[in-house]
Amino acid sequence: MRITLCGSGRFKEQIFEAEMRLSKTGHTVYSFGDKSVSYHSQEPNVDKHVLDLVHLDKICNSEAIGLINEGVYLGHSTAREILWGYIQGKEFYDVIPADGMLLSLDPDLVRQRALKRLAEPA
């Protein structure tokens, strides 16, 4: 399956671990475009905006979105990616990075949580 991993830059190590584990089980996995970029910065960054748009394109080319630590923290960027995936009709999974396990999520519940987060201040 083609999966785009989504989650806060706060969890980039878990995202890279999940990417490796899922790839080893035969999935095509898309994650951050540049592992050296600090995604948790308050400074405007043109590169970040471009990479965010590329990430939305990765979602379009995927069958599913894998959420990393979705239950712990959900930022505005991840909420936006969830809504984009919902609009595109993607499946959603909670990813357990330590073993690469995929747990199916109800798209409507994930969408509701994303909408709630986007209604809150950044």
Image: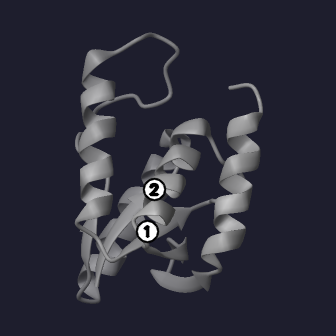
The N terminus lies in quadrant = bottom left
Check contact, mark 1 vs mark 2: CB within 8 A: yes
* Residue 18 visible to the viewer: yes
Q: What residue type is labelled 1?
A: Ile
Q: Which residue is drawn at 46% across and 69% down?
A: 66
Relative placement, left or right, of 87 versus 60 is: right
Residue found at the far front of this picture: 87
Q: Quadrant of residue 53?
A: top left
Where 112 falls versus 119 (above or below)?
below
Q: Name the residue under label 1.
A: 65
* Residue 45 coordinates in the image, percent (x, y): 34, 15
Q: Residue at x 60, y 74 (%)?
A: 107
* Residue 35 coordinates in the image, percent (x, y): 28, 42
Which label sits on residue 6? 2
Q: What residue type is labelled 2?
A: Cys
Where 93 falls versus 44 (above or below)?
below
Which label sits on residue 89? none
Relative placement, left or right, of 49 versus 71 is: left
Q: In which quarter of the image is residue 3?
A: bottom left
